[in-house]
Image (cartoon, grey):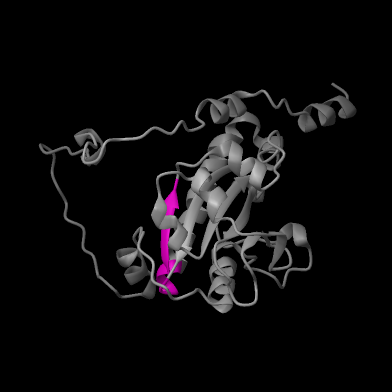
Amino acid sequence: MKNKEIYKKLLSYDPIDIGSLFYNKTKIKFFKLKKNKIPRTWKRIYFKIYPRFKQIKLKVNNNSFEIDSLLINRKSLRIFTKRKITFKELSNFLFFSAGINNKKTININESRRMYPSAGARYPLEIYLINLKKIGNNNEGIYHYNVKWNTIELLKEENCKKILSKVIPNQKWISDADTVLIITAVFNRTNIKYKDRGWRYIYIEAGHLGQNFYLNAEKLKLRCCAIGGFDDNIVTDLLRLDNENEVPIYAFVLGK
């Protein structure tokens, strides 16, 4: 095969691949549950144990490092106070969760971020739906520009009403300061890893999500991950190209 043909094949991308089918087939369909009628199987936590085999107890030294206490105290919190997140807190939260951690590098293509990424492809983007004024920044939709460490105002508006459609039956969210939406530009990863890239993208979202939780705990903020949201409304709200960039994860942040 000639070099030009090999190069063309490497750059080709079929939007109707396994990953796209998976994404479209798993879009959420909301339904209402009767009060106090949550199935027991939704509440029970399962563990896999080999009781007949020798058990070696692990020795844990609690709180020897700051990361220990952050991991122990990290939790999903859904009740927010009337206090507002400061712009400095939001700045630290975003940078230490997703910013570039080797800014002194001359070549931007050698830059690395606060979380691991398969092949250093970094397919994830972060959008903020601010429900309150944060510092001098009004309510509206923002994008975190990792390269310049800035937030970009995409649209200034009151988003509470539309957010109730994005994540229905979750009134507590309206008390938060902002909702973070993680999207994936999947071809950044799939151009190298093809269909296998879909696995790496979702794994990477988990890495970033843990950073959100740990930084929220460090800054004394309250954070809660949300997996159930209306993909189509989020796509329209953020004006995403559904064939190239899709929403995959959401986090609610407040005080």
Task: Say which of 49 and 98 sits in front.
Answer: 98
Is residue 4 visible from the viewing direction of this image?
Answer: yes
- Residue shown at the point (84%, 28%) measured from the top left: 8
- Residue shown at the point (43%, 34%) measured from the top left: 30
Residue furthest to the left in view is 52
Residue 27 at what x, y percent from top left? 52, 31
Residue 33 at what x, y percent from top left? 30, 35
Task: Say which of 247 and 132 sits in front.
Answer: 132
Region of the chain picked out in magenta, as a range: 216-226
Looking at the figure, which quarter contains the N terminus? top right
Task: Inspect the magenta stretch and tell me whether residue 203 lies in it.
Answer: no
In this rendering, the count of numbered labels is 0
Is residue 116 visible from the viewing direction of this image?
Answer: no
232 left or right of 220 in image: right
Residue 178 at what x, y percent from top left? 53, 62
- Residue shown at the point (34%, 60%) measured from the top left: 75
Task: Say which of 240 and 105 sits in front.
Answer: 240
Residue 83, located in which quarter of the rendered image? bottom left
Residue 106 at what x, y percent from top left? 78, 68
Q: Is residue 7 above or below residue 76?
A: above
Residue 231, located in which quarter of the rendered image? top right
